[in-house]
Image (cartoon, helix red, strand yellow):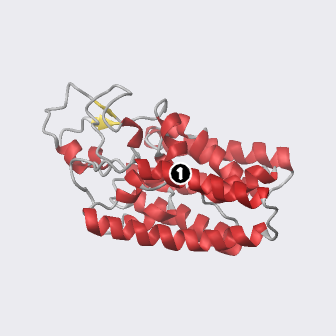
Amino acid sequence: MMHLKKYAASFLMLALFLAIGVILWRAAGNLFYLFNFGYIGGAIAFGLALYERKYVHARRVVQLLVGLYMLVYLGLICRENMQIEGFWYYLFSGVFEAATIHYAVAKIFGPLIFGRGWCGYACWTAMILDLLPYKRGPRERKKLGFIRYILFSLSLAYVLLLFLLGVRHKEQIMFRCFLAGNLLYYGVGIALALALKDNRAFCKYVCPVTVFLKPASYFSMLRIKVDKTRCVSCGECKRVCPMNVDITDPSRSRKNGTECILCMECAEACRKGAIHF
């Protein structure tokens, strides 16, 4: 029994996603929701179990399992645009499925529970960017965060214009946007990473989805904390954080506080075992 206790977080995460899947299945009468959320919850639970077993690539496993599912199966095979313009499209179409449910669970209301966990474990753009060599990035950020708000507004304006002009074949247009958007995101993300020597530069300055993620993340229930009785103020956690979060500050208004992606790089670097959920 004691052996299973350390996997409590895995069981809870799986139960949470299964509960969401069952509720949506019963509400919409579509069994796919149970499969979808069961798979994603299972992948995250598996990754948490690997983390408990000290497997160094646990988060990467989850990124691949969820990221490739979202990109290849839902995006390319099912032809669902899971990017921000897809959310606007389904929202304006009055269709509460696909991207609208995905955004509600993962990016609008879900962050109240797990913060920016999506960015650390499920984003198919970051899945590729995290393979680049600049794991830690510069200590100080560039003042380029305004770009995300511009792209957020442009995506909204673009889809709204499609509806106002009565453009036909919007479904096909959205799929082409998904293909072009992913190529653009990967291209810009890789270019920024190389230019700024920071794998997560795209996430910090460009990604429009963070406009949804940041507000709820401020109130997130799941947060990384530091045990002050063990901390020796060595600064290693700040040095390795890919998102420049001051994890030693317990306040919600800590520096870059809404940027934490729960990657646990800080916990793995802490020699005193002072960092935990």
Q: Nearer the viewer, residue 80 or 195?
A: 195
The C terminus lies in quadrant: top left
The answer to whether 45 is drawn above or below residue 113 in the figure is below
Could you say where residue 163 lies in the image, as x and y percent from the top left? 78, 57
> What residue is at 70 percent from the left and 65 percent from the top?
80
Q: Is residue 8 visible?
A: no
Q: Nearer the viewer, residue 276 or 5?
A: 276
Dividing the picture into quarters, in which one does residue 166 lie?
A: bottom right
Give the labeled residue for mark 1: 209
The residue type indicated by label 1 comes to Val
Could you say where residue 3 lies in the image, as x and y percent from the top left? 43, 43
Q: Please, which residue is most extreme toward the front here?
A: 165
The answer to whether 173 is drawn above or below residue 82 in the figure is below
Estimate how packed mark 1 is, as few (under 14), some (14 to 19) or many (20 or more) residues with alpha carbons within 10 Å: some
> How many numbered markers are drawn?
1
Decide if residue 57 is on the left or right side of residue 141: right
Decide if residue 84 is on the left or right side of residue 250: right
The answer to whether 56 is drawn above or below residue 264 in the figure is below
> What residue is at 56 percent from the left and 68 percent from the top?
181
Secondary structure of the residue carrying numbered label 1: loop
Dividing the picture into quarters, in which one does residue 87 lie?
A: bottom right
Q: Is residue 250 visible?
A: yes
Decide if residue 218 is on the left or right side of residue 16: left
> What residue is at 60 percent from the left and 56 percent from the top?
155
Could you say where residue 65 lies in the image, as x and y percent from the top left? 53, 64
Q: Nearer the viewer, residue 168 or 132?
A: 168
